[in-house]
């Protein structure tokens, strides 16, 4: 017998018991000592099983992959829709109209509005000439007259452009004094206004002009230094077609130092602005028409911040009620989260002072902060010139800048300083231009255009006088700005301007003003209409 063969065990015959009814019959009778398989055969069986498993897995992967590449049927209904190409609408802009004051000509009846003077318009249109009219009605009683808000229209065409601005200097009335210049704007459904105050001696009027053919229903949101303002009358303000509504902000929030207003219109559209004026003790201390600023954003650019007669401003701060002459930035946070904000000030020309500082603006509040906050103790005031203020935040905010000007004070017979004629201006954040633009320069002194390049590469823009003349080339440094003095009461084409920010400012002794430039809305964008 070979050594690797074992004898079969001899077992006695045993009768298997009958299976229980509740137990299944076994397929085989297990032996107490089963015969071992050979090692080679076991390895072969295992290998075959592994191979079969791998083949099966590969087949499954191929099936799944094939199913993944085969488009599956979907069940759905394509919504009915029609794309409509509207006819281009005529170009339309509205201007603020004459300066207004509370009280009649004699200075009595503080609930009555009256107008002061007539603004001078500067209009630029191409091709052709713009049609000019005025609103038919106004809360100030100016409807249908030269003092009413002006409306300018131009027929639509592929190359149509329309721009306008107004300027007015108040000198003859003791209750209003100063220069007010503002750009005429397209009516909008949403406008953000930063400026003014309703504290003692400060008056701020909300101007709502509706040059469209449909009544506008206006809702106001108002914030201040303490948070949102909740007051009756902020909703459902009707502005009929062809009319101007004038609403004193003090009716909603008296003694508000830092208002920010959001205007929303439904139905018709409105051209919204603020008129703010100051009375210091008994002296008129400045007036301005405040245009709308850029919508809330994490980065805002305020070009053309004009510092003028800063020595006179610094010398007049100690006179009673003149402490608010300093240039400030106003930051409004309409959101629900606190904002960490960086404010930087960069000069347009050499010789200025660049500064930056950080601050926190709590959710739903407004903060005013001096632009000189980052200057070292004992450092002199900001040198005169044009600056760009950039606001960066970690949550969307709105912003504006207030500047003031005043000559050096005189001295009375007792040796006390006597303030000279002061003025103020609120300068808004400028949205980027979407292409070439037509610029209307108001009839005001020493206009300085500032163009800001946000790109990290140098750029060149060109200015062409609309009435003819030499083209002006303006080199813009990377992430910087450039400025130049223009002729007043004229118009220019700004070419190669896509993406840049632009504003203009005016200044003279006792006068300061400024406004931003915007691109027109697209009037013929295709619309998708669904039932």
Image: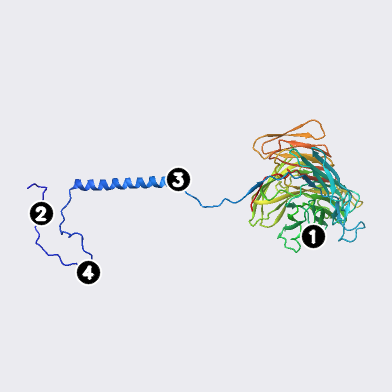
**3 vs 2, front mark:** 3
Of the pair 454 and 517, the residue shown nearer to us: 517
Name the residue: 70% across, 47% down: 374
Question: Where is mark 1, residue-wise?
Answer: 250
Rendering coords of residue 453 (x, y %) = 69, 39
- The numbered mark, 2 or 4, whose residue comes first in the sequence reads 2
SS under mark 3: loop
Q: Residues within 10 Å of mark 3 (few under 14, many from 20)?
A: few
- The numbered mark, 1 or 4, whose residue comes first in the sequence reads 4
- The numbered mark, 3 or 2, whose residue comes first in the sequence reads 2
Mark 2 vs 4: CB contact within 8 A: no
**2 vs 1, front mark:** 2
- The numbered mark, 3 or 1, whose residue comes first in the sequence reads 3
Question: Label 3 vs label 4: CA separation?
Answer: 54 Å
Residue 263 can be seen, yes or no: no
Question: Where is mark 2, residue-wise?
Answer: 8
Question: Where is mark 4, residue-wise?
Answer: 21
Name the residue: 41% across, 45% down: 66
Looking at the rendered structure, which numbered label has been put on residue 70?
Answer: 3
Q: Residues within 10 Å of mark 1 (few under 14, many from 20)?
A: some
Name the residue: 32% across, 45% down: 55
Name the residue: 76% across, 34% down: 463
């Amino acid at each position: 017998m070979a050594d690797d063969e074992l004898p079969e065990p001899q077992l006695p015959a045993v009768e298997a018991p009958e299976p229980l009814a509740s137990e299944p019959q076994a397929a085989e009778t297990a032996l107490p000592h089963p015969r071992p398989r050979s090692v080679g055969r076991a390895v072969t069986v295992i290998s075959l099983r592994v191979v079969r498993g791998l083949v099966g897995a590969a087949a499954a992967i191929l099936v799944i992959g094939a199913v993944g590449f085969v488009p599956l049927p979907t069940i759905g209904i394509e919504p009915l829709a029609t794309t409509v190409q509207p006819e281009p609408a005529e170009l339309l802009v509205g201007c603020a109209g004459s300066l207004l004051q509370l009280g009649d000509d004699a200075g009595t009846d503080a609930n009555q509005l009256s107008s002061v003077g007539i603004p001078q318009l500067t209009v630029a249109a191409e091709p052709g000439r713009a049609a000019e009219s005025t609103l038919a009605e106004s809360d100030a009683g100016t409807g249908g007259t030269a003092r009413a808000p002006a409306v300018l229209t131009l027929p639509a065409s592929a190359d149509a452009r329309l721009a306008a601005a107004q300027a007015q200097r108040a000198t003859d009335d003791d209750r209003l004094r100063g220069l007010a210049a503002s750009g005429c704007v397209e009516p909008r459904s949403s406008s953000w206004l930063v400026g003014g105050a309703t504290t003692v001696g400060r008056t701020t009027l909300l101007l709502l002009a509706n040059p469209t053919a449909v009544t506008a229903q206006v809702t106001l949101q108002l914030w201040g230094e303490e948070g949102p303002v909740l007051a009756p009358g902020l909703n459902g303000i009707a502005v009929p077609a062809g009319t101007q509504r004038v609403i004193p902000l003090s009716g909603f929030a008296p003694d508000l130092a830092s208002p920010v207003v959001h205007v929303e219109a439904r139905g018709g559209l409105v051209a919204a602005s603020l008129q703010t004026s100051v009375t210091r003790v008994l002296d008129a201390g400045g007036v301005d028409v405040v245009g709308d600023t850029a919508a809330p954003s994490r980065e805002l650019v305020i070009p053309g911040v004009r510092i003028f007669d800063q020595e006179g401003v610094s010398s007049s701060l100690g006179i009673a009620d003149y402490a608010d002459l300093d240039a400030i930035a106003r930051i409004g946070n309409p959101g629900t989260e606190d904002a960490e904000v960086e404010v930087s000030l960069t000069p347009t020309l050499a010789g200025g002072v660049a500064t930056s500082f950080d601050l926190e603006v709590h959710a739903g509040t407004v903060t005013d902060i001096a632009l000189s906050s980052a200057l070292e103790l004992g450092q002199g005031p900001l040198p005169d010139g044009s600056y760009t203020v950039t606001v960066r935040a970690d949550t969307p905010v709105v912003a504006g800048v207030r500047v003031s000007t005043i000559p050096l004070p005189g001295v009375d017979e007792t040796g006390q300083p006597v303030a000279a004629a002061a003025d103020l201006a609120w300068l808004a954040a400028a949205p980027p231009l979407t292409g070439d633009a037509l610029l209307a320069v108001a009839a005001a002194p020493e206009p300085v255009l500032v163009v800001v390049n946000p790109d990290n590469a140098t750029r060149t823009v060109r200015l062409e006088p609309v009435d003819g003349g030499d083209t002006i080339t303006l080199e813009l440094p990377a992430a910087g700005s450039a400025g130049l003095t223009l002729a007043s009461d004229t118009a220019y084409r700004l070419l190669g301007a896509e993406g840049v920010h632009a504003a203009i400012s005016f200044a003279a002794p006792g006068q300061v003003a400024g406004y931003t430039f915007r691109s027109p809305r697209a009037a013929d964008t295709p619309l998708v209409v669904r039932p």
